[in-house]
Each structure stands twice: as C-alpha cells, then as structure tokens.
Amino acid sequence: MLDASSHSPAPSGVSLDLRKTAPWIIFIIFFGVLNETVFNVSTPSIAAQYHLTPSGVSWVVTIFIIFFGIGSVIYGKLSDVYSLKKLIVIGIIVYNVGSILGIICQAWYPAVIAARAIQGAGASAIPALIMVVVAKYFSPADRGKVFGILNSTVAFAIGIGPVLGGFISAAYHWSFLFLIPLFTLISIPFFRKVLPDDELRGGKVDIPGAAMIGLSIASLVLFCTNPTWYYFVIGAALLIGFIVHIRKVDQPFIEPSLLANRLFRSGLIVGFILNCTVMSIMFVMPLLLSDLKGLNTSAIGWILFPGAISAVVFGPIGGGLADKRGNNIVIAIGVTLLACSLIMLSSLLGMNVWFISGAMVFTYIGFSFIQTALANSVSLTLNMEQTGVGMGLFNLVGFISGAVGAAAVARVLDKKLMNFPVNPLMHEVGGYLYSNLLLVCTVAVAIGGTLFFRSYGRMKFKTQ
C-alpha cells in the first residue's frame, strides 16, 4: 500500500501541477503494478506449453516478486543519492528490456524467467520512485489527494490484471502479455520534461547487502520448490552473512535496530504469515479452476474479477473504519472474512464456479482490510526517523512472503502431499488436494490473527 509516510517530504523549489501531472502518474503506476497479477491466470497455459510442474511454472510469478521487492527498497534508497528523473527513466527502460526479451525468446523457458526477473527489477522503480515524486514535488494540499488516487490505481491494476491477462492469453497467446509494459515508454518524455535535474547528494546504497539478501531469498525459494540440501545451505549461509554484514556497515540495507522493536518484529511475522497465505491462494486458484473445472484463461480471469474489484471498493471502507474504530477491529473483521471464505472454498470446490467466485469476494475483502489495518498498526510502532526504512522493510517482507507462499504451494501440488479426504463437505475426489490446501491456509490465517492480537490486542491502535 502506498503511504505518504513512507518518505518524509523534502523541501523543493519545484511544485508539480496536479491536473497536468496526475494523469501521467496514474498511467505509469497502472502499467507498473499490472504485471504483479497479469501473468497469474496464464500459469496453466504456460505450464502446458513447456510441460512444467506447478513448481516449475511458479517461477514465472515468484522471480518477478523477488526482484520487484528487492528493487523497490534499492530504488527508494537510490532516490536519496541520485536524480529522480534519471532513475525513473532507467527503471522504465529496464522494465521494457525485460518485456522485449520475453516476447522475442518466449520459446525458451529459461529466457522467459530471465525476462520476468528483468521486468521485476525495472518495474520496481515505478511505485517506489513515484511515491518520492509525490512527497517531494506536490504541495501539501495536493499530496493527500494524489496518494489516495495512487492507492485506488494500484488496487484497480491488481484487480483488472487477471481479467486482462486471461483475455489476452485466450484471444492471442500468453507471450503477448510481455507487450503490455511497452506502453510505459510514451511517458519518458513527460518525466524528462517536468522533473528537475536533481544534484547528486551524499550517501551510498548497500549493494552487497541487497545482493546477499536477494540471493538468500532466491536460494530458500528454490529449496521450497526443489528441496535439495545445498540450496538450503547456500540460503542460510547468505542470510547469516547478511546479518553479520548489516551490523558492520554504516548505512545497511536493513537497519538492525528496527528488529529490536518487539511490536515491529511481531508485525513483520504476522505480515509474513498472512501475505504468504493469501499469495498462496492467488497462485493456486487459477491452477485449481483449470484442473478441476477445465476453464480457459479468459474464464478464470472473469471468475476472479468480482473479488479483485471488491478489494478496490472495500479497501477505502476498511481505511475509514480504521480511522473511526481503530485498527484492531478492522483486523478482526478481515481475519474472520478471510478464514470463513477459505472454509467456504474448501467445501464448495465441487459446486458451480460462481459459488467459488462469490467466496473469493470475501477473500479479497478480508485481505484488503488486513493490509490496510496491519500497515497502519506497524507504522505506529515506529518513530518518525524510522518510518521510511521500517515500512520499506515491512513491504519487502510482504513481497518475500508472496514468493515463498507460491513456491511452497507449488511443491505440495507437485508431490500431491495432501491428496486424501479431510473436509466432510468435500465430495469431489479430484479436489481433495486443493480442499486440504485451503484448510491449511485457514489454519495459517488463524495463527496470524492470534499472533497479532497477542502482540497488539491490548494496545488501542487508532490512526491519528
């Protein structure tokens, strides 16, 4: 979630005009975020073309998430040192280099994965740097409006992604999804014209630290999809090296003092569990609808669309409720809706697909409530100087958990580890594995909610 608090506004002699600038910012944010979900419903088609297992095809999603998450933090830190104008242009160009590579080399799966990684590295610049642009170059009177517009745009892009991806894949071919980011190239002249030429400032970015944590995450995700001992050893060694490294350097990639904050640390754990669970669901649902119901990518997109759009509508409602009643009540509602929807999904897999679509509406609404209130609660555990770095770390953990969740679920599907009847309401033999996965996700949601209220339950977190 975009948040004005993520970057403290710096004094600037330049003020951008809201009417002239907002349409371009909406445009670039839409196409920057769209790639988070546009490939999801096409995973069955990709798996069929390359004869991949769920673990194999999961890398189309997870590699983008890993590079997007790490890149978001790196670009945010680079913006304190280098010109915003140049960084945005570089990010857009890198994004499109990945897209061109993907469309040219779509016949070779390793090249597709490399293209998705490059896309993630470039796309991560867009939300991270646009947030800084708004904080630096819009007047205080306009800033709140722009952040509100950006949050709605992000929610809409994530919601429309599965529908757009499904339509393009069904009408043409999934590889045409790589063409979508090319639209962002037309925004380069605008940003080159309106953004000032910032002078270089002092400071440095902990590239070795970023590389270590990125490679550690990739190794551990590889271990989830292919549990070979050396992946785990490499990932653990890099993680230990990263922890030692950030305690020695002056400007570490992650500030160690943040992790000494018990409430903040608990918020990271809760965020990891709940994000991991929901991203697992988002990965598995297209595969489920293709496998059990025989739906094509376009139909899958339309089944998921009502839920995704409901998040756009109810997200602001959750934010308003948090302002009036506090974050805890919103988390309680969100966890309840999410858990109930998963139980419904686990039980309704043998019924008409529109029952599944209806249950997914509650999944999306519950998660939108959790996202808003959890981010608010975590931000209130940080002092002003820690807010930018702390919320950056919180968002990074969210991205990482999504990659881990998709990889872990893919492994379970590969090995059919839970392919036996558990839910007495589930009678479709082919759906036992999916039904049990959803029950496990329900338990994870309950654990995440319990941990939240054990840490935050006695504190009246109400946004100020």
Image: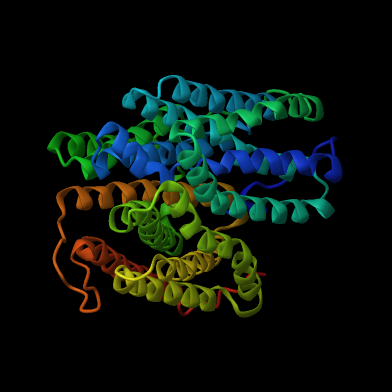
Question: In this rendering, does residue 202 appear at all?
Answer: no
Q: Nearer the viewer, residue 152 or 415?
A: 415
Q: Nearer the viewer, residue 291 or 206?
A: 291
Q: Residue at x 50, y 43 (%)?
A: 165
What is the quadrant of the N terminus in the image? bottom right
User: Which of the 4 image quarters holds residue 85?
Assistant: top right
User: Which of the 4 image quarters holds residue 337?
Assistant: bottom left
Q: Residue at x 58, y 37 (%)?
A: 76
What is the quadrant of the C terminus in the image? bottom right
Residue 358, percent across and down?
46, 70
Residue 146, percent across and down?
75, 51
Q: Nearer the viewer, residue 298 or 331?
A: 298
Residue 284, percent across and down?
33, 54
Q: Residue at x 51, y 22 (%)?
A: 100
User: Which of the 4 image quarters holds residue 111?
Assistant: top left
Is residue 207 placed above or below 290 in the rendered structure? above
Residue 140, percent across and down?
81, 52
Does 199 sit left or right of 181 as displayed? Answer: right
Question: In this rendering, does residue 106 appear at all?
Answer: yes
Q: Residue at x 35, y 56 (%)?
A: 289
